[in-house]
């Protein structure tokens, strides 16, 4: 066990890796699967513990939260992924903070990222986020518009399109999510056939703590894990409502 009764991250990683390997065997797959630790609302001490346990890929959902944490994290070989929705007016700050943007979802955002990456002087790896569920609260490009966006990104000199990402509906049992993962893999294969210059589909970011095994079976190269690594996030405690009614 870790501090204050929390789960040991090294033990959690070992269990996850066993499950990943079993999923690969079921699918007849070989090759390394990248574990991206999602550190939203995770204290820096726990992030450092995950780094010491061997994790090197970390994902944050919000620019502001990571901007606050970043000065406190001295993790020399860590790769930081922006996995949440990114507003175009925060593109420059995101490029300064993150090593890759895994949630690119529009041509306008791509242009902003390209400009910021050019000013920084090095290529920026990106994934296009694809919207596969009928959930208006979630972001991503619609599958029908994916080829056009990929072509636009391919024409930007400072972006390196490396694959696709999706955030499907949360469904139980996890087997119900399989069609979404399969569809993302098929979309990546269709883009691969186009042979766009400078574009590769070597990364498929799909699968989270409750459904990553199904995602691995369907071709994920990286899975995004929060609660499976760190345990449940702390729940927000609502302040008690003060009764201002004089008549009680």
Image (cartoon, rainbow, N blue to C red):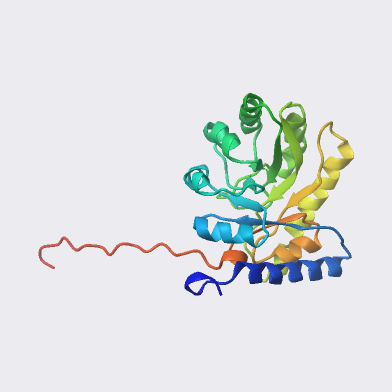
Q: Residue shown at 54%/49% (left/top)?
A: 73
- The quarter of the rendered structure image containing the C terminus is bottom left
The quarter holding residue 125 reads: top right
Front residue of 5/213: it is 5
Is 104 on the left or on the right of 7, as rendered?
Answer: right
**Residue at figure coordinates x 52%, y 42% from the top left:** 63
Q: Nearer the viewer, residue 199 or 11?
A: 11
Front-most of residues 119 and 216: 119
**Picture residue at 77% right of the left edge, 61% below the top:** 216
Does residue 172 appear in the picture of this structure?
A: no
Up/down of 134 relative to 53, above or below: above
Residue 24 makes an appearance in the image:
yes
Question: Measured from the top left, where is residue 140 in percent x and y?
Answer: 64, 44
* Horizontal relation, residue 108 to residue 233: left or right: right
Q: Which percent across, then down, holds residue 195?
A: 88, 35
Q: Quadrant of residue 211?
A: bottom right
Horizontal and vertical percent position of residue 55: 67, 57
**How many numbered discs, if any?**
0
Q: Which image quarter holds the N terminus?
A: bottom right
């Amino acid at each position: 066990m870790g501090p204050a009764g929390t789960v040991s991250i090294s033990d959690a990683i070992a269990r996850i890796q066993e499950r990943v390997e079993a999923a690969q065997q079921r699918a007849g797959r070989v090759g390394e699967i990248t574990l991206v630790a999602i550190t939203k609302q995770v204290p820096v001490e726990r992030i450092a513990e995950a780094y010491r346990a061997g994790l090197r890929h970390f994902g944050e959902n919000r620019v502001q939260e990571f901007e606050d944490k970043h000065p406190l994290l001295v993790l020399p070989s860590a790769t930081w992924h922006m996995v949440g929705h990114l507003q175009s007016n925060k593109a420059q700050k995101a490029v300064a903070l993150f090593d890759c943007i895994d949630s690119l979802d529009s041509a306008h955002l791509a242009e902003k990222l390209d400009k910021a990456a050019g000013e920084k002087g090095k290529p920026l790896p990106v994934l296009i986020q694809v919207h596969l569920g009928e959930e208006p609260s979630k972001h991503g490009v619609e599958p029908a518009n994916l080829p056009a966006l990929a072509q636009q990104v391919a024409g930007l000199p400072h972006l390196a399109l490396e694959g696709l990402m999706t955030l499907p509906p949360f469904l139980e049992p996890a087997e119900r999510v399989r069609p979404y993962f399969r569809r993302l893999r098929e979309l990546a294969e269709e883009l691969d056939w186009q042979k766009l210059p400078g574009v590769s589909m070597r990364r498929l970011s799909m699968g989270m703590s409750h459904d990553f095994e199904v995602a691995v079976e369907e071709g994920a190269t990286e899975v995004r894990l929060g609660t499976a690594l760190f345990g449940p996030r702390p729940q927000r405690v609502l302040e008690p409502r003060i009764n201002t009614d004089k008549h009680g």
